[in-house]
Image: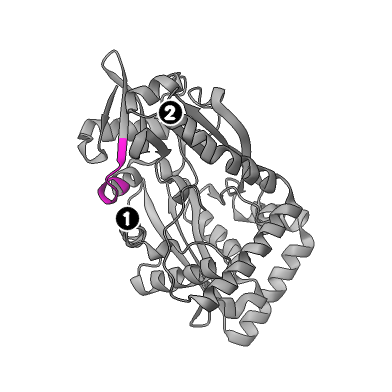
Amino acid sequence: MTVIRPGELGRSELARWRDLQSASPSLDNPFLSVEFTLALGRLRPYVRVAVIEDQGKVVGYLPFERHAFGIGKPLGSWLTTCHGLIAEPDLDVPARHLLRACGLSVFNFDHMVAGQRTWSPHESAVRPVPLMDLTKGYDAYIEYVRANSPKNYKTVRYKERKLAREHGVVHLEWGATDPAAMRVLTGWKSDQYRRTGRVDRFAQPWIVELLEEMHACDSPAFAGVLTMLYAGDTPVAGHFGLRTPTTLVGWFPAYDPEFARYSPGIMHHLHMAEQAASHGLGQVDMGKGGREYKGWLKNGTIHVTEGRVARPSATAAVHWMGRTPVNKARSIVVDRPSLYRLADRLLKGFGRVRTSLHPAAVEKEPSGAR
């Protein structure tokens, strides 16, 4: 096993990565694509790739972050929604052996591909990820939604007709290329972060640069997709995500709060699903999380896992004391809808106060924040 920087991957290693990913349906996620690893490797000095070989043949890759004192994190950690080994399905490398080769003392994960043998013994929780399954076409998908959530569906369509009457025809632009449209979306998202008491990710220049680079990517195997929903000529909601040939993954959805009464975010998701199906995509991965709208928009589910691997060391012990109580508290909140709603209200209240006192505040993203 060797550990290198992403930019040191050779042409044959890049091809092998793509072959391994395309051969396994569980790896059909753009955050596992080599293009995403290469981009992060150019922007962040702590990104590494473990190249796993067996008898001279590459059998797997682990993209990861190596921080001070041997603290390891999945690639993108708090910024992404899927981590894992890009490897042959039957690969079974002991996790602690992998950590030793990578020079790591501890490795926490919370969006690991379920079912990978390396991580299974160290899982502490399995979480569902809601999908908009479009493999049977958009019409079949929308019939499922209409039948299973008739009240929600009728309400959204009523609001769409109202929005069209009052502001102009509702339509979605798929694959918007104008950088100005991206700035509109990130502006909405920054405002949302502040209003809801969360750290503004776009206050960090490298994240803005990453989005710009991903927005410029457009190949059959991997692309950034910006979608914008308009009422007439006015943008009301949007989303930027990444896609493989068959899967679009949710990343940064946002809407103009001036149009909140029309539920433009949900409206946008329905239009986005229609366009995704028309462009040959089989599913939209909405990411794990407690947003209620995902519950009635989904018609499929996959799973990701949470857990921790550590080698005996002082660093691992200190890390455990600092992280484990927080992670357990987060799990308790996520597993109880009433607590989740309370926490969400408290964060939003804090956000309103913080914005009124420090409207231009810039903060650093804390470890593990989402």
Looking at the image, can residue 111 be seen?
no
Q: Residue at x 69, y 54 (%)?
A: 340
Query: Marks 1 and 2: in contact by CB < 8 Å?
Result: no
**Residue 66 lies within the magenta run:** no
Closest to the camera, between mark 2 and mark 1, is: 2
Left/right placement of residue 46 relative to residue 279 reads left
358 versus 317 height, above or below: below
- Quarter occupied by residue 31: top left
Residue that extends furthest to the right in the rendered view of this protein: 151
169 versus 10 height, above or below: below
Residue 144 versus residue 235: which sits nearer the camera?
A: 235
Left/right placement of residue 166 relative to residue 48 reads right
The amino acid type, in three-letter code, at marker 2 is Ala
From the image, tell me which residue sits under label 1: 217
Q: Residue at x 59, y 73 (%)?
A: 352
What segment carries the magenta color? 40-48
Residue 324 screen position, x and y as percent: 57, 37
332 versus 170 height, above or below: above
From the image, tell me which residue sits under label 2: 314
**Residue 43 lies within the magenta run:** yes
Residue 35 screen position, x and y as percent: 32, 45
